[in-house]
Image (cartoon, rainbow, N blue to C red):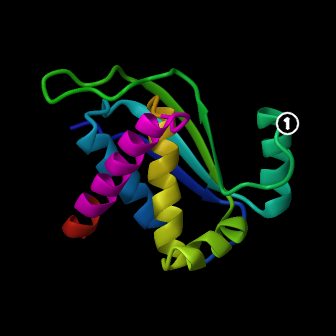
Amino acid sequence: MTLPSISVDDDAGSSLDLTALSDLAGHVFRQLHVHPECEVGITLVDTERITTLHEDWMNEPGPTDVLSFPIDELTPGTAEQLSGPGILGDIVICPEFAHKDANEANRTLDQHVQFLTVHGLLHLLGYDHATEEDYARMFALQDELLDSWGSTR
């Protein structure tokens, strides 16, 4: 069986569980029927780097917790028909910035970065939260994916 190409890089020098992020991405691929010949990159960066990316690519001031950069604009498949193979894209996460939100959400930093990983993957797969309806759909799926992954660990 072909496995997806999931790279996880820690340019932030964090102490997070990188294997868990890779395993979680694989879980999301399986649950959303993403073709196993897809590639995704997850990179953890410092506040300075996320600020530069946020300002340059999103025209938004200051840092943020997660950014997603889709490449082949793939969408989830179905049990009967996987998504097409290709390059899903890149997710960039700033653990330093996410730390405050983790505390407010009563999560460990590892748990919150895992949450952001699923959030970023859903954005790469075409989900958004621009409207209340889209928000409800995306966040329900996000919770479902995290719950199902947590039950298999």
Residue at (85, 53) in percent of width and height: 62
Residue 17 appears in view: no
Neighbourhood count class around disc 1 (C-alpha, 10 Å): few under 14, some 14–19, many 20 upward:
few
Q: Position of residue 15 (x, y in %)?
A: 60, 78
On the rendered structure, is 117 left or right of 139? right
Q: Position of residue 105 (x, y in %)?
A: 51, 73
Give the position of the N terminus as an image quadrant.
top left
Amino acid type for the residue under numbered disc 1: Asp
Q: Is 135 located above or below residue 75 in the figure?
A: below
On the rendered structure, is 132 left or right of 96? left
Residue located beneath label 1 in the image? 56
Is residue 85 highlighted in magenta? no
On the rendered structure, is 91 left or right of 79? right
Is residue 129 highlighted in magenta? yes
Q: Position of residue 152 (x, y in %)?
A: 20, 65
Q: Is 82 located above or below residue 129 in the figure?
A: above
- Classified by dominant secondary structure, the portion drawn in magenta counts as helix
Q: Is 7 located above or below residue 45 in the figure?
A: above
Residue at (55, 44) in percent of width and height: 41
Asked where in the image residue 153 lies, by quadrant, the reply is bottom left
Could you tell me which secondary element the residue under label 1 belongs to? Answer: helix
Residue at (27, 62) in percent of width and height: 147
Residue at (85, 36) in percent of width and height: 56
Q: Position of residue 150 (x, y in %)?
A: 27, 67
User: Where are the magenta residues, as a range?
Assistant: 128-148
| Nearest to the observer: residue 13 or residue 32 | 32
